[in-house]
Image: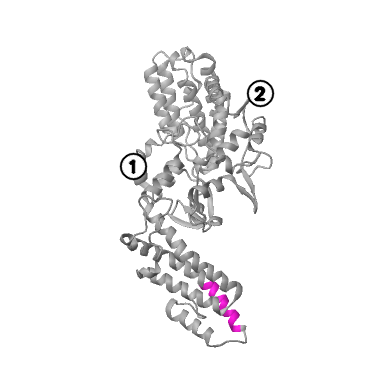
Amino acid sequence: MKTLGVSTLFPFEDIPLWLGKSRALTALQTRVMPIIQEDIRSVVDAGLKEFESAEMIQALQQLGQAIHGLPQSIVRSSLEQQMRFFVLVVQNRLDDAEEPAPLRDKCAEMIRVFGAVPVLNETVPLPALEFLPSQYVDSAARWATIIWKNPSRDAAKEKIGFFDKRQADGRIASVRLHLIDLDGDDRETGEALSYADADFYAIGNLQADHLQPSENIIYRQLELITAMNIDPILRQAMLDQGKDKGYFIETAAGCFGSKLFFMEYHNCIGNLWFVSTAYGGQKSNRDPIEWFAQQERFGDKFFDAVGGRESINRASILYTTQEGVLLADVARQWFRESYGQEITVAGYVARQIKQPMLARAQKVERRGMKREGVKLMASMVTAEGLLEGDSDASADSGHTSSLASSDAAITPRNLGRMKEVAAEQLPAVKEKVHDAFQGYLEVAKRSRKQGAGKKEIEDKSTREFGFGTGGK
């Protein structure tokens, strides 16, 4: 029987922080990594029949405990990845084990702690054909022949990015066009829904956000490629699954991912949604499970709806539910159903308050005209009327948003909620209007024609809205 080299490693020595944690961890990695890799190769070459199951179980247990006890670092992440490779090759050869059941249970335990090597998703849906570049089919065929070894969003040569489509006003990312089609306001106000806060924003202020961060996706893709070159069983399984996709290129030096492999996963519309720039900055590249857990609008409510946090399936490169539905698709649908009324109210406020007031403000800022200033004041009065429940200020109250038309109509019964959302929206809108109105007042000051009209506007703005030359 063969003996596992990792059996000689335990316990890992304590990391002497006073000498420098980074240096000590690097030294540990240099010592243990070759031994783990040699054991992985031995299992691949000889199978499990050359090893005692009890020794293999003990080795996996001790290795897992030793790695788990290390401080968080790049070294620990590298060793955790080796642990996933070790479990992979053992799990794929359980039929050769003397006692496969206990060893299978130990592999399952290690996967719960360290995760598993990800595999291909069954499908990677792209933006609809109408939103893809006109030459996409030809480009995809070419990309399937190009090897990419170290892709990233910042790379000079192997640069990952969004597909874009030529429009009359320039090139626009295909994913943005698709998301606008899904989540844009049905009145074509130039705004779309942000899934972080159930509100509408100008398209330019929305990020096409990867729910599962693109850095994480690339890391998982590269891990799969590495694992395919370690384990022939996994390699053949992935080649069979991806044979018509153009994702892999085999050479004498090994198996590599194609440019198409990385680009299509980056542009998967099932992993993208709109979030406002403020929320997008907060989310950054955080794990989506962690991010959901900390968001008031998602949290336990969302996890309960999908079967619990543990029901999120991380077996494939892109996270899915147990039914195989991509996580962003599930989150979008749940969000619209859960906040349908609020989304409709936000859309109504955008059309009836925000858009008219900002349009007037832009005219005031651009023209510096008294007539436009009077119209701006009228818009503000209308907004105040809506907040006070003035039915005359909400003539379009029967409108229903296309995002949740079945259960989110604006009716007298939900005007109370509309008032709450409008109250939340109005301060920010007033701030923008104030800046524009101040510009108008400055122009008026410099004008020789400072009549009663300008004085009346200034007095009214100060009296009713807190606007005027003195501030908000």
The residue at 51%/56% (across/down) is 188
- Answer whether residue 364 is magenta in the image: no
SS at mark 1 in the image: helix
Disc 1 residue crowd, few under 14, some 14–19, many 20+, Cα 10 Å: few
Residue 205 placement: quadrant: bottom right
Q: Main secondary structure of the magenta part?
A: helix
Instruction: Tell me if 94 is positioned left or right of 28 in this view.
Output: left
Q: Amino acid at mark 1?
A: Asp
Q: Is residue 169 above or below residue 367?
A: above
Pick the front one: 1 or 284: 284
The residue at 37%/58% (across/down) is 410
Q: Amino acid at mark 2?
A: Ala
- Alpha carbon separation for disc pair 1 and 2: 47 Å
Q: Earlier in the sequence, mark 1 or mark 2?
A: 2
What range of the chain is rendered magenta? Answer: 434-445
Residue carrying label 2: 253
Residue carrying label 1: 304
- Answer whether residue 437 is magenta in the image: yes
Picture coordinates of residue 406 (x, y %)? 37, 49
Picture coordinates of residue 371 (x, y %)? 55, 78
Picture coordinates of residue 109 (x, y %)? 39, 28
Outermost residue toward the right in this view: 157
